[in-house]
Every structure is written in structure tokens, then in C-alpha cells.
Image (cartoon, grey):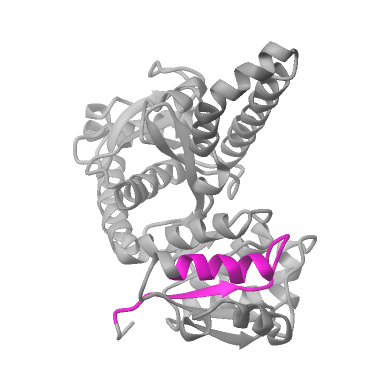
Amino acid sequence: MGTGKIVLALDGMGGDHAPDVIVNGADIARERYPGTSFLLFGDPARLKPLVDKRKGLSQALEIVPAEDAVLAEDKPSFALRRRRKSSMWLAVEAAAQGRADTVVSAGNTGALLAISMFAMRTVAGAHRPALASFVPTSRGETVMLDLGANLECDADNLAEFAVMGSVFAQVLLGLDRPKVGLLNVGSEEEKGHEELRQAARWLRRPEAPVNFHGFVEGNDIGRGTVDVVVTDGFTGNVALKSIEGTAKLYTQFVRDAFRTSTFAKIGFLFAAGALVKMRKRVDPRRYNGGVFLGLDGVCVKSHGGTDALGFAYAVGVAVDLVRYEYKNKLAEGLTKLREVTSVAEASPEALQAGGGAE
């Protein structure tokens, strides 16, 4: 943008609690990120009263009318064909055409991916986009992808996801050389299917644009063994939902334990401060903001059921990706990866030097 300010296109009608959460979240983000401005797409009759309630928000926000909205039950193909006047479509289009630097939506995930791929296309060197986000670990935070955009992946996809996740971690976690691991059923080199082993051979090469740790297992995610965990969308989505479910189960167990007796309730009073800290540490709102990496643009997917604070965190992810030039750094990394894979394919000796063919 010519002014140097970051402009965000927001899908004002997307999400379980839209438009209230979207407007209130934008107001929180406005205070956290001075200098940002918003294009808010949706029904003006519903949006304007909410914006007017937030003092000063109207000065940083422009409401752009959209006569339609993508519904939660819409199939991606239907949204792509029949929702071209929706708030989601128009917001994505604004980012794709350069009227905004990025787009944030809490709406239908499949529809957002389909519309974004159609409007933005993929960046040079990427065959498919991948959905990435953060998970809390014992060492801090770990990037994980793909979380559901691609149920089946070949070696090219996995290697590209490794580059995408590495650059993502550099930009948002401030790491110079984040460690990248491929999720597998064991850490040994011979484990896993051929596509995994082929991707590993490319990533192990000295000239590969990632700091490749090797294979990691499911229990390595929580340990924070690596900074980036790469897998296909089917496995990644199952792993993420398992982590979320286990966290909720553990929280319920703790609550039940403190209700078992009078002494337990007294113990809760002494432990309350520590429990509050723990709850903040695993608060899902802090990790809200999945990103479709690999698009020729910045598209952030907020959880549909989040509150205003969670949506503000998603906006923060979008701001940082633009501010630290994620897209340009990704293009450079993918170019280097393509050089590695093309050399290996052209030279059997080079391939063997990187681990050998099975």
C-alpha cells in the first residue's frame, strides 16, 4: 500500500457469532496495532450500529456493502459459483486485487479455501496451499501443517509444506533457523511410506532451504521437539483434534477432582492462581488464526466459534505476515527447494548422496 499502512479486508458476516464478534475484534486489534485500517464487508444495516458503538473505530474502518453471505452449510463448490456477492468473496477479492494487504474470515473453511485459491492462485513454486496454525508445547509454540486442506499429499507437497512452515515460523516466532520435522510412525529413516521418505531425502540435502530435524512422532508434538511439524491434512487434522480433545478432557478431570470433597475445594482456593496461569497458557484464543500458506496472498482463517479477543489474535497473525513480508520470503524458499529437487531428479548420483533411492 502506498501509505505504508496495513489494510485488512474482514468478512463481517462470517462465523458463528458474526457480525458482533468481527466488529468487536476489529476494535481490539485497532488498539493493538496502531496504523492498521479495515475494509469491513457485509450488511451495512447490521454493521454500522455495531461500529458506531465502538468509539474511534469508524475512523479506521470502512464498511463495504455485501448483499450476500456464505453459510456454514454451503459446500465449497456452491460458494464458489453462487456466493460471488457475499462478504467472504468480496473480502478475498479485495486482497487479491491489492485493495487490501490481507483478508481475515471466521466463515466456512472449505468455502474460504476454494474462493481464495480461485481469486489469489498459488505463489510460484507451490502446488497446493496448506492450512497452518500453532499448538502449545512444553517449550513454547510449534507450527503445524497441513491441518485439513489436503487429505492426500505426495513428496512434492510435503517438501513444499516444510518450506512454508519454516518461513511461517521465522516470521511469527522470530526464529532464524526453525527446526522442521516430518510426522511419521517412527523416527528411523526406513519408517513411513515412500512419499514421506522421498520428501525427507530432499530436505536432508545440505542446500535445502530448511533446517531439517528428521522424522518425529506424535508425542514429539507436545514436547516441542521441533519448531515445525509437517504432515498431510488428514493426519494433521486428526492430530490437532486429538490434542484439543485431550486438553478439554484434562481440564474436566481437574475440575471434577476439586469437587470431590471439602478439603479439595479448600485446595482449589490455594491452587486458583496457578490454575488461572495454566488456563491462560492453553487458551485456544491465543492460537486462533490458521493461515492458508502457499497462496499468492495472505488469507487468515479464524475459528468460527471464537470471541472478539480470539478474532483480534487472528487479525494480529495477518498483520505480522504482511509486516514481515512472509510472501516474498516464501517465494525465495520455494525457489531454492525447486533447485534442490530438480538437481536430485536430474542426477542419480546427487540423489544417492542425499540418502539414496529405495
Decide if residue 331 is in sight here. Answer: yes
Q: How many marks?
A: 0
Q: Is residue 154 magenta?
A: no
As drawn, which residue projects farthest toward the left?
206
Query: Quarter-wise, where is residue 347 in the image?
Result: top left
Query: Quarter-wise, where is residue 319 in the image?
Result: bottom left
Q: Is residue 7 magenta?
A: yes
In the image, residue 37 sits, relative to residue 285, either above or below, namely: below
Q: Residue 201 in the image: x percent, y percent?
A: 33, 31
Decide if residue 124 is in sight here. Answer: no
Q: Residue at x 64, y 54 (%)?
A: 306
State left or right for residue 153 relative to residue 317: right
Q: Quadrant of the N terminus?
A: bottom left
Q: Residue at x 38, y 19 (%)?
A: 189
Q: Which residues are magenta?
A: 4-30
Q: Residue 48 in the image: x percent, y percent?
A: 65, 84
Q: Quadrant of the C terminus?
A: top left
Q: Residue 266 in the image: x percent, y percent?
A: 64, 18
Query: Quarter-wise, where is residue 90 in the image?
Result: bottom right
